[in-house]
Image (spheres, helix red, strand yellow):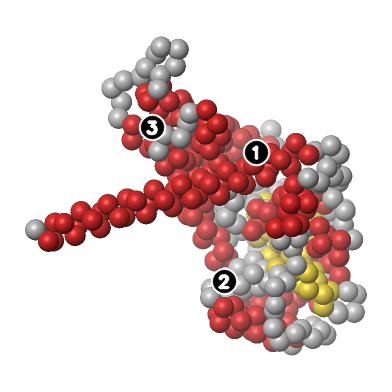
Amino acid sequence: MHRLFQNVTRTSLTQGIAILIVLLAAVALDLTRWGMFGFVLTGIPLWCFGVVAAAGGILFFLGPMLFGSVPPAIKTEETLVLYLRPFELDARNFLQLIIGASTGVVVYIGLLKGLWWPLTFVPLIIKINREQNFQDVFTSFGKFVTFGKPQEWLKPIGASRVYEQEDWTQEVRHFMSLARVVIIRPGESQSIRWEIEQLRDFVPPERIVFYLQFRGWKKRKERAYQSFRNHLQSHAPTLLPTQLGRARFLLFDHSWRPHFIEEANRPSQLVRQLFSRAGDIAKDNMRPVLKALNLDLPVQHNNWLNNLTTGGLWLGALFSVGLVVIAVLIAAIRIIAALTLFLLK
């Protein structure tokens, strides 16, 4: 069996086992608290089910991190989308595993009766990395690939990883020349700055997309944008505005004239997407960017049910995160109260 299919099978198997573990923990807790058909499970502390569910949630995300797909050699006639980003963004693996572990919190607080059952699996659909959203959108137009950090053993969830064999600079140039679209998230690392410098020689400007989401507070973001602006203008015949504004995507025409584009993620736009029968919410907010690239997503007819399901899952995700935050706050208040009483005594 080809290595790619082996990886996919391992990932699918791991995630399937993880879902079963979460389901079993939820059912067991349900049997303990309310019973079913006259049968009540006794003798097991409730916190055990939370721990089991947390382990299942961690396994759900750990599977693709361990067995994430590595694409075979890219052929010159194949279509691909290349994603370039600073390696430090991959550190969010740990946060994704924490999100998976929060499944145990949802199970433990016992919201499993009736309509609350779907909330058990809500943490498993939460994505914390923008790369995952790009993957959902751009896999419709080719293989979505990026370069992996050398010697990493946990692969971030998202694009298929390519690991350089000899000269990584030569491989970057090769993939740039093949890519239908090159998406770059700027940073301060020397490697990403070097990659930006290569764009003019290997990628037509109308195939370039910059995702300008800088980390930190407002002043730090402004400094990061100014640094990016100065660096790009010194290596490409373009002139960017001094202030970034609300737009987060930067594209160019064939003469390097810049165009800033906002995502369609305002409340009114999201409501229209919810009732759209020709798209889905996860991809519709990227349509302004795709339109500027002259790319059309495959039309999905009569998918209003899918949109309502997606919207419901997002609402459930927000509710679930709120519950986790409330539970943590309550625990913190109790701890502080207990310490205060102890010190007063």
Residue 317 position (above or below residue 49): below
Amino acid carrying label 1: it is Val
Give the residue furthest to the top: 38
Which mark, by number, is residue 215?
2
The reply to whether residue 283 is in sight is no
> Does dot 2 land on a helix, a strand or a loop?
loop
Give the residue furthest to the left: 345
Mark 3 closeness class: few <14, some 14–19, many ≥20 residues within 10 Å:
many
> Does dot 3 land on a helix, a strand or a loop?
helix
Q: Is disc 2 in contact with disc 1, using a CB cutoff of under 8 Å? A: no
Q: Which sits in the foreground, 143 or 305?
A: 305
Estimate the x, y position of residue 37 in percent, counting from the top left. 45, 12
Estimate the x, y position of residue 285 in percent, counting from the top left. 75, 57
Instruction: Please report the residue visible at 59 percent of the width from the left and 38 percent of the height from the top.
Output: 11
Earlier residue among tags 2 and 1: 1
Left or right: where does residue 323 sit relative to residue 44?
right
Amino acid carrying label 2: it is Arg
Instruction: Please report the residue visible at 80 percent of the width from the left and 71 percent of the height from the top.
Output: 251
Quarter of the figure with the C terminus: bottom left
Instruction: Please report the residue visible at 59 percent of the width from the left and 51 percent of the height from the top.
Output: 127
Left or right: where does residue 223 sit relative to residue 334?
right
Which mark, by number, is residue 332?
none
Residue indicated by mark 1 = 8
* Alpha carbons under labels 3 and 1: distance apart: 29 Å
Estimate the x, y position of residue 177 in percent, counting from the top left. 82, 65
Residue indicated by mark 3 = 49
